[in-house]
Image: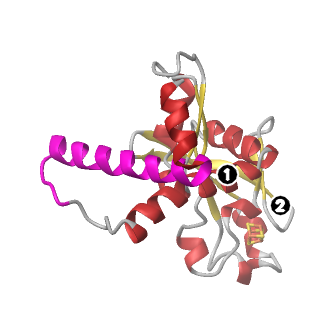
Amino acid sequence: METLEVERIEAVAYRGYFKIEDIEVCEKAGITAYVPKPIRGPAVAQGFFSKEDFRYDLEKDVYLCPGEHVLSPRHFGKSRDNVKIDYVNRDACKACHLRERCTKSFRRVSRLENEAVLDRMAARLADRPDILDRRRESVEHPFGTIKQWMGQGTFLMRRLDNVRGEFSLTALAYNIKRAITLIGVPGLIAALQA
Ligand code: SF4
């Protein structure tokens, strides 16, 4: 942001960077983050409905489950530094015809106290699904080229400063190769002289 002299910036990352603490910090710092949510968790691992199958009602502070039952906040705990709230409806689960697809006993859906930050990001991603393709096209290509074509799968140097220097040279070489591909050597020389 300092380099670009702007007060807001967009950051797009792949799902490995999905972490609520970081996304919250981004929001506070004026960084609009776009990070897709990984589909994971014990329920998914067991083949049950994922959390995305449950709809959160912000006004009522409840979840609506795939069986159209209301799950209310019952248990309060901690997840790292965040307050975690479990939403349940034991009676509905007992008599539910979808139970085999949802839980072994009764379903519990957890929500962090600050999870609205993730809801806002999900809404942004739903508005701009193409932004993830643009990240893949613009970011994966250089790294794939550097690792596969330029043979830099591992660093030769050790220690942070040395590795930074090595990667800066690699990035410079990549940028020159790319500029030659796009505008040719005469175009590159003309741009340098301008
Ligand atoms: S098992 Fe419980 S949470 Fe799951 S669909 Fe049925 S009522 Fe809803």
Residue at the image point whose x is 62% and y is 36% from the top: 117
Three-letter code, disc 1: Arg
Quarter containing the C terminus: top right
Residue 160 sits inside the magenta stretch: yes
Q: Nearer the viewer, residue 48 or 183?
A: 183
The one nearer the camera, 98 or 91, is 98
Picture quarter with ligand 1: bottom right
Residue range corresponding to the magenta coloring? 156-183
State the image coordinates of residue 10 (x, y, percent, origin top left).
61, 33
In the rendered image, the vertical position of residue 189 relative to residue 143, given as above or below: above
The verdict on residue 165 being magenta is yes
Residue under the point 12% across and 53% down: 158
Residue tagged 1? 134
Q: Is residue 188 in view from this perspective? A: yes
Q: Position of residue 167 (x, y in %)?
A: 29, 49
Disc 2 Cβ-to-ligand 1 distance below 8 Å: yes
Q: Is residue 110 above or below residue 114?
A: below
Label annotation for residue 69:
2
Query: Is residue 18 rendered to the left or right of residue 136?
Result: left
